[in-house]
Amino acid sequence: MKGSGGSCSLDQIGSDQTVFLMQTIIFVRRSFVVRALCILAFALLVASANGCSSKDNQRRSNTDDPVAERKSKPAPIITPPKNTAGPEPGHAAMVKRLARLHEKVADLEYFGDSAKRAAAKRVDASTKDGDFFGRLQSLFELGSEQTLTGEADAALATLALTDPMLIEFAEKTPSGVPNDLQTAIYFAKALAAMRKAENENCVFCQEGEGCLFPIRGKGVHLQTEGATIAIENLNAALELAPNDVACRWLLCVAHMTLGTYPDGVPERFRIPADRLVSDEPDFPRFRNIATAVGVDTLSLAGGVAVEDFNGDHWLDIIVSCWNTDGQLRMFQNMGNGEFKETTEQANLVGIFGGLNINQADYDGDGDVDILVLRGAWLRDSGRHPNSLLRNDGTGRFDDVTVEAGLADENYPTQTAAWSDFDNDGDLDVYIGNELHANQLFQNDGDGHFVDIAKAAGVDNRDFTKGVAWGDYDADGLPDLYVSNNTQPNVLYHNDGDGRFTDVTKSAGVAGPLPSFSAWFWDFNNDGKLDLFAPHYQEGIEFVALDYFGLPSEAPPDALYQGDGAGGFTDVTRDVGLGNITVTMGSNYGDLDNDGFLDFYLGTGYPGFEGLMPNVMYHNRGGKRFTDVSIPGGFSHLQKGHAVAFADFDHDGDQDVFTELGGAYTGDAFRNALFMNPGFGNEWIKLRLVGKQSIRSAVGAHIHLSFRDDGETRHIHRWVNTGSSFGGNPLRQDIGVGKAKVIDTIEIDWPASGTHQTFHDVPTGQFLIIEEFSETPQPVECKPFFFDVE
């Protein structure tokens, strides 16, 4: 192929340049696009250094590559010009503002197609110019972008055009095609093929088992072309790079989809058999009934809030989808085994976006409102407004963000936590932002907020991904934990005078780095708050190394056991939590009603290669955790985001809802609702109502004492919605083992300091307990059965 206009042709590349190319290729995989772009960029660099590219080609390579640019530079700001008089208030104004944001979606990373269109133009230009390396690079970019936008067949066709070019490369260079370049292209083809397989078999699967790891039984694919192509390319890649653990991992997964694992995989590439077996192989299976009950929304990454939004005592579901036209959707629990979508009736049409949402009764009127958090991962292009949606008590919402004072400054975020940090009887909210100062909004008591983060010493200018409140030293004041992506995490002690002190170093809770979601809880029921912060090191290789039993530089998750006096001890490995998880969404609850909190981790990262099982851990008496993901049916390979544990059918045990779907438009998936099969243990439901303390009782401490199989036991709970990336209901579902009567229920209210005690309370009840009241109020709410047969 001869070049024209000073462009580079293969005839001009000698053996020295090829050897140099092979020696200087950097093998990087944070996503498959970045991995191969590094390789191809070095090819262009070598060619240009030897006079094989014109200045025009160099300029085009360096400045017109939106894929490379978006990985290294901030994306353009697309927030509408700020009104000097302040944002226009009102629900209708917010709907218009969100619609204007969506009009610029083509320029946004993850959602837009401008990078794909630009790559297509470069394919045409490099073909016309006879620019060999420019064409090779732009074909790779175009195929990769087509995969990300969900066009798997088009991606495979585009990437196939590199085949004759690699043959020509091999024929005309003495040393042939560098292995890393060839494996990168094989890898890109394999990912496009695996997405094709997912689109054709899993996304619309009615059984809900198409992506449960290890894939088998009803999960085996009926349409086999995609997986077959993936296996062909992964085998080719492993011929050249047999130690590539990501290729090994995906080869195993691809064979599982065809029902040919393990026999179809060379023994040296297989996952050790003991990693596919739980220490609790007989743990009951939770069936995914989301499709059967109509809550399997097809969406990208998002949040969930589970709550009784209309006051009928049945738990409803609100979910978000983070793209700029991702509709916030509400599903009302009808109390008869069905959910009805009430998005329009809830006045949510046009309320778009939100990687995360959380709920709180911010105005103390007795019904639960919603905070929608927007702009995460988009850097300065993510300076989208958040939305505070006020509930009128019937499950109808109005956007009051501007009126509440939460719209003066908009920063990219996906995490917030509510607490009455000053114990004045109303809810305040801390919002963790990315690459901007965090915000602590103090409630003035009338539902209006003022940001005092800087004055309080908690502005934490980093890349915050999770925030959580908890009174870890039992001094009656909620403290604050901030989970960061690029700097160590921070624990702020509430000094009680409106200021906080950074005590991270003395507490020893700075890791892991990076991390994402976080929460305070009492995992061993000793009455002292503990802290959990799972790690978030992007890369399928870290999970693969863990499964293959190979050493890894990635840190494990971190479980810090509190001593109740301000100290913590890292007990992660002591309790069996040393595995690598790459956690995003998460939450905790009590699956078997034994009184000890279990937890579920939604895993993954934006890259399409990030297929890894979500993980459910079963708490074994507060002493050890067991991975029950596989026997329990929780080991979903799709990217896991917000999680909620909730008893939707009022049968006394908690079901699990999880929001699934990736970041890119081509990575949508359906949400899951795992129905609890029941464990035969007893329970009690408590809804606390504050009078002097905040009405929703956030931060109140519940202590149960009872006899279980002849042993006196204690259970401790603090009222909140769980993890920083999850939305449990504020009512507390508490398992009590085999106890028929609870000897004492004790409540400590934070603002008033009131201590309530109730004696000899039968289990199997739903009770409302008001602050200062002497008698709990029973709620009649009969269970129903989901009709899912």
Image (cartoon, rainbow, N blue to C red):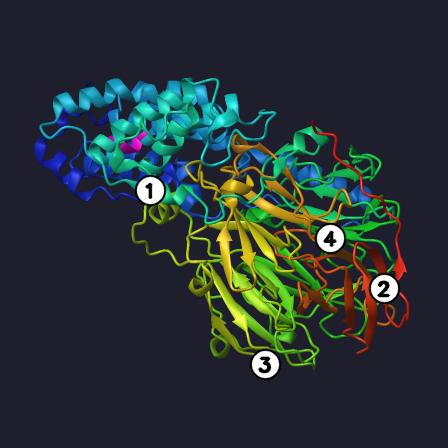
Circles 3, 4 touching at the beta carbon (< 8 Å): no
Q: Give the CA separation, mark 4 to mark 1.
A: 39 Å
Residue beneath label 3, please? 565
Horizontally, residue 445 falls left or right of residue 236, namely right
Q: Secondary structure at mark 1?
A: loop
Q: Which residue is mark 1?
A: 272
The answer to whether 91 appears left or right of 638 in the picture is right
Which percent across, then down, holds residue 588? 61, 55
Can residue 305 be seen by looking at this rendering? Answer: yes
| Image height of 64 relative to 766, above or below | above
Q: Secondary structure at mark 2?
A: strand
Magenta-tinted stretch: 182-186
Of residues 82 and 231, the one nearer the viewer is 231
Gap in angstroms between the C-alphas marked 3 and 4? 29 Å
Amino acid under label 2?
Ile
Q: Earlier in the sequence, mark 4 or mark 1?
A: 1
Identify residue for label 2.
769
Which of the two discs, 3 and 1, sits closer to the camera?
1
Circle nearer the viewer, 4 or 2? 2
| Amino acid type, residue under disc 1 in the picture | Pro
Q: Give the residue drawn at x 46%, y 58%.
A: 557
> Would you say the magenta stretch is mainly helix, strand or loop?
helix
User: How far apart are labels 4 and 2 at the CA level?
Assistant: 16 Å
Disc 1 to disc 2, C-alpha distance: 51 Å
The image quadrant where one finds the N terminus is: top left
Q: Which residue is mark 4?
A: 729
SS for dot 4: loop
Which of the marked residues, 3 or 1, is nearer the chain's N terminus? 1
Q: Residue at x 33, y 47 (%)?
A: 545
Q: Residue type at mark 3? A: Ala
